[in-house]
Image: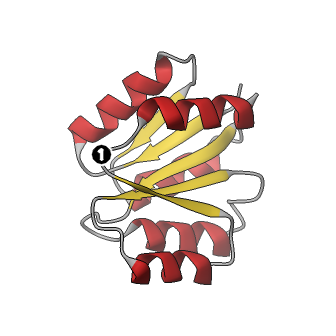
């Protein structure tokens, strides 16, 4: 099974999501900022999905996706953008990327995400 890259500056959120997904035998790699996420994407060909927080110091999840798209690192990956601050502008910004990305509100439904990922990553 391919791995999920989880990107969030809040360590508690990273651990909670990673542990929740690992209960479904979904391998996870955590990154706490955009720079680390791009490093993982460059070096780990087995990434099948990205779950990134919207608001992070040093750059947003949208910034990460724009950079990864420019570097051609998103092909074949499921993309989820999570935030406690979803609004219509965020949805417009996601659509403007031109990728198939899903916006998810916090708090996350870990079971729901896990079921989606199991089907996608298998």
Tell me: 10 left or right of 40.
Answer: left
At horizontal 71% and vertical 42% (from top left) the residue drawn is 45
List x then y, in percent, for residue 19: 38, 22
Quadrant containing the N terminus is top right
Which image quarter: residue 119? top right
Q: Is the residue 2 above or below the residue 54 in the image?
A: above
Q: How many residues crowd mark 1 within 10 Å: few (<14), some (14–19), many (20+)?
A: few
Q: Is the residue 111 above or below the residue 120 in the image?
A: above
Between 115 and 10, the residue placed more toward the observer is: 115
Tell me: 26 left or right of 78.
Answer: left
Q: Judging from the image, what secondary structure is the residue with disc 1 in? A: loop
Between 67 and 82, the residue placed more toward the observer is: 82
Quadrant containing the C terminus is top right
At horizontal 63% and vertical 35% (from top left) the residue drawn is 117
Report the number of discs: 1
List x then y, in percent, for residue 6: 45, 43
List x then y, in percent, for residue 44: 64, 40
* Structure colour scheme: secondary structure
Residue wearing tag 1: 107
């Amino acid at each position: 099974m391919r791995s999920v890259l989880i990107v969030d500056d809040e360590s508690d959120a990273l651990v909670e999501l990673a542990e929740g997904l690992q209960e479904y035998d979904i391998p996870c790699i955590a990154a706490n900022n955009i720079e680390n996420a791009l490093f993982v994407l460059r070096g780990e060909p087995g990434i099948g999905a990205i779950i990134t927080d919207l608001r992070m110091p040093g750059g947003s999840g949208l910034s990460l996706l724009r950079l990864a798209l420019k570097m051609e690192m998103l092909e074949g990956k499921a993309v989820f953008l999570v935030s406690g601050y979803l609004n219509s502008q965020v949805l417009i910004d996601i659509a403007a990327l031109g990728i198939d990305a899903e916006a998810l509100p916090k708090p996350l439904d870990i079971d729901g995400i896990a079921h989606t990922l199991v089907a996608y990553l298998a």
